[in-house]
Image: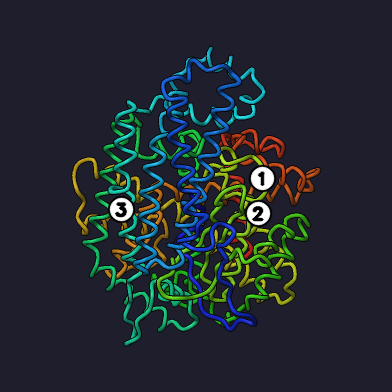
Amino acid sequence: MRHTTSPPDSTASAAEADVPLPSWDLSDLYSAPDAPELEQDIADVTEGAAEFATSYKGRIAELSPAEFALAISRYEETTQTLHRVGSYAQLLYAADVSNPEVGRFYQTVHETITEISSDTLFFTLEINRLDGTALEAFLEDEGVSRYEPWLRDVRMFRNHELSDELEQVLHQKSVTGRSAWSRLFDEAMADMRIDIDGEELTLADTLNRLSDVDGGVRKGAAKALGKQLTGQVRLFSLITNTLAKDKEIEDRLRHYASPVSSRNLENQVEDDVVDALVTAVKSAYPALSHRYYGLKAKWFGVEKLDYWDRNAPLPNQGDRTFSWGEARSTVLDAYGHFDPEMAKIADEFFTRNWIDASLRPGKDSGAFSHPTVPSVHPYILMNYHGRSRDVMTLAHELGHGVHQVLSGPQGALMADTPLTLAETASVFGEMLTFQSMLKNEECADTRRIMVAGKVEDMMNTVVRQVAFHEFERMVHDERRDGELTPERLGEIWMQIQTESLGAALNFDDDYRHYWAYIPHFIHSPFYVYAYAFGDCLVNSLYDVFQSGHDRFQEKYLNMLRAGGTLRHRELLAPFGLDASDPEFWGRGLNVISGLIDQLEE
């Protein structure tokens, strides 16, 4: 039930809308939490999972190839129903995190799914105990060979699996372990109210003020947020320490070499490829973030930018806002000029109410596209305030959505993609939208502002996310030796921020606990480097597109249709790209450096 998200640390401000901001219609999943169809699906999948265990548990190695193919098909049907039920509960919860009844429903469904899926847990464990000869014999059957990519991915984890009994215990206790701590974090964030001059604001509204045209507004929001996080830092430190220790215990049991290794394996990317990415970005800090923020400080007429001015609009930029209708047409036009099929798919999200963009207290403050299940369709959640960054967020999430629709025919077991590749379509959608907006702008000053905005987005997607990755790495490494105090977490945060953003940024103690509101640290450890991976990959991919590569659009859509069936080497080969090539990451980073060159000129 994974969903993909926009990079943390985005900001925006409010705008008048020509039409009411949409709220999604979840009835394609279920009409209500007490819908008879939902109850029937839970009853059917409970019975089906029990029958599946009775039919196959302990017998996988004895099955004929045809019987094995049938078993995989039945497992896929069970998985799809469980994901459909779970997706509905998760989307309801994200839309109204503060509602205790919705929270109760979400937790009940989560516990029910965990209990039901315990009956099918044996299946992948037994597949991983098959020797290579037995698997090759199974794959000679046409029904089995269709699932070869899924079997390949399942068997990636065979050296890290535990006994059936331990796997069952870890699976069933997850609802009172990691999931429970994650829910506590979500509810604490949703309930948080930041006092700014007597006005109680949500976290999302406070973050939006960090890109206000008024420096006093930005400073007030930054100081108030820092004060609020400091007041709750013991809670967030406890959550962070507990989840880091939980991961360390499981990683040790499963014999992972480092805290990031399990994420790399899940992302189907080699450790050395990730190391090369991180090393390349860190080496480029002086040429990218240090240089850009030094340039921005000069534009503001100061030696150093205060941290609340990092995402500030440029001097004389104005406060341009985009109505929801303008945002829709901007993204759809950009997608349509690239390929009409992309625009047609994206338009369905608007016409069929698959987007929740409205602003309301208690709603998840982030943005994501949830693929739900292939037999239905994805849903997008965001908070639309009308800034250009919100238009980019819409383009980002629609990129995910189009990708998820195109990969859907691969089925419930193979439609999903690793995080590194999942971010490709979203970042490419942003690039298409930015380039379209830039092309249509005639004013030179406005174009300069747009380029600066794109550079800042790239700073947030590449430099900031690698910095977040380094923060996680240090926290998880140190947690092995004992709990980290709030003070130590703050020290690590300030060290990493200073290194990544450079001498042109001025930080004070109010910034020390800003690590606490980043949800990716809680929900998906080491997720964040996928944004930098995706951005650099897209920069290289877009460079190939601009060079007039033959049948680029056709190859690109085929890449999205592949879902999780192909690895990054296979997907990039038609474009002449290879992420394991040391020059690959430099090519992507040079695109960013080139934009900064333009601004300096």
How many neighbours does mark 2 have within 10 angstroms: few (below 14), some (14-19), or many (20 or more)? many
Dot 2 falls on a residue whose secondary structure is helix
* Whether residue 82 is visible: yes
Q: Is residue 423 left or right of residue 505?
A: right
Q: Is residue 488 left or right of residue 467?
A: left
Residue drawn at x 49%, y 50% as measured from the top left:
40
Is 212 rendered above or below residue 295? below
Labelled disc at residue 180: 3
Residue drawn at x 45%, y 28% as measured from the top left:
123
Position of residue 461 measured from the top left corner of the image (x, y, whole percent): 51, 56
Q: Of the residues shown, which amino acid type is indicated by label 1?
A: Leu
The numbered mark, 3 or 2, whose residue comes first in the sequence reads: 3
Labelled disc at residue 402: 2
Query: Residues under labels 1 and 3: Cα distance?
Result: 34 Å
Residue drawn at x 34%, y 57% as measured from the top left:
183
Q: Are marks 1 and 2 in contact (CB under 8 Å)?
A: yes
Position of residue 175 measured from the top left corner of the image (x, y, whole percent): 32, 48
Residue under label 1, please give it: 560
Residue in the foreground of this view, choosing between 324 and 511:
324
Labelled disc at residue 80: none
Q: Of the residues shown, which amino acid type is indicated by label 2?
A: Val
Residue drawn at x 46%, y 25% as measured from the top left:
56
Q: Of the residues shown, which amino acid type is indicated by label 3?
A: Ala
